[in-house]
Image: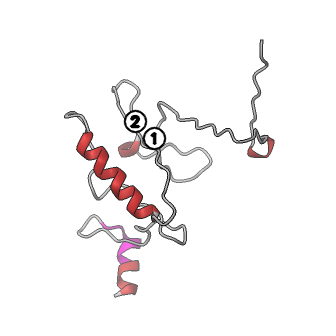
Amino acid sequence: TRRREVQKHAAELTERGDAITLSIDHRQMGVGGVNSWGAKPHKRFMLPAHVPCRYSFVIQPLDGGESPQSAVAKALDEVARDAPSDWCPLPAERAPRPPNREGERSDAGSVPAGPARSRRARRQGHRRG
């Protein structure tokens, strides 16, 4: 029997040659929350355990001169084209955008339109304009 190695911290990880391991959680409580030390995700981002869910993902290498943005756009087009009829994509305004070349999300600093904007978002929009 092979002993299972368990690392609890990133510093405990050991290099294993060219092998790449990708671990994907099937279910999670959701994303978000107000802080990183125990706050639950906001209700609208929670994934209830009693609701069935399906998801898929694409892993695609980049060609030498291809930008990450164009690769993501191409992959999303392919996924949308081949998606099953009961597939429910995120609304465009909630879909994540790929990072720009500096590593920041390209939607960073964007301000939603309309009355749903927070006071902070309205202040930031006012300063820019």
| Amino acid at dot 1 | Gly
Residue at 59 percent of width and 44 percent of height: 38
User: Which numbered disc covers residue 121?
Assistant: none
Secondary structure category for the residue under label 1: loop
Instruction: Report the magenta stretch's main SS.
Output: helix
Q: Which residues are magenta?
A: 117-123
Query: Number of numbered discs present?
Result: 2
Residue 25 belongs to the span the image colors magenta: no
85 lies above or below 122: above
Residue at 70 percent of width and 42 percent of height: 18
Q: Sequence order check: which comes first, mark 2 or mark 1?
A: 1
Residue 104 left/right relative to 76: right
Secondary structure category for the residue under label 2: loop
* Residue occupying the far top of the picture: 1
Identify residue for label 1.
30
Label 1, residues with CA under 10 Å away: few <14, some 14-19, many ≥20 = some
Q: Position of residue 48 (x, y in %)?
A: 39, 31
Q: Position of residue 33 (x, y in %)?
A: 49, 49
4 or 17: nearer the viewer: 17
Residue 121 belongs to the span the image colors magenta: yes
Colour convention of the picture: secondary structure
Which quadrant of the figure contains the N terminus? top right
Q: Circles 2 and 1: CB distance less than 8 Å?
A: yes
Q: Position of residue 35 (x, y in %)?
A: 56, 53
| Amino acid at dot 2 | Leu
Identify residue for label 2.
47
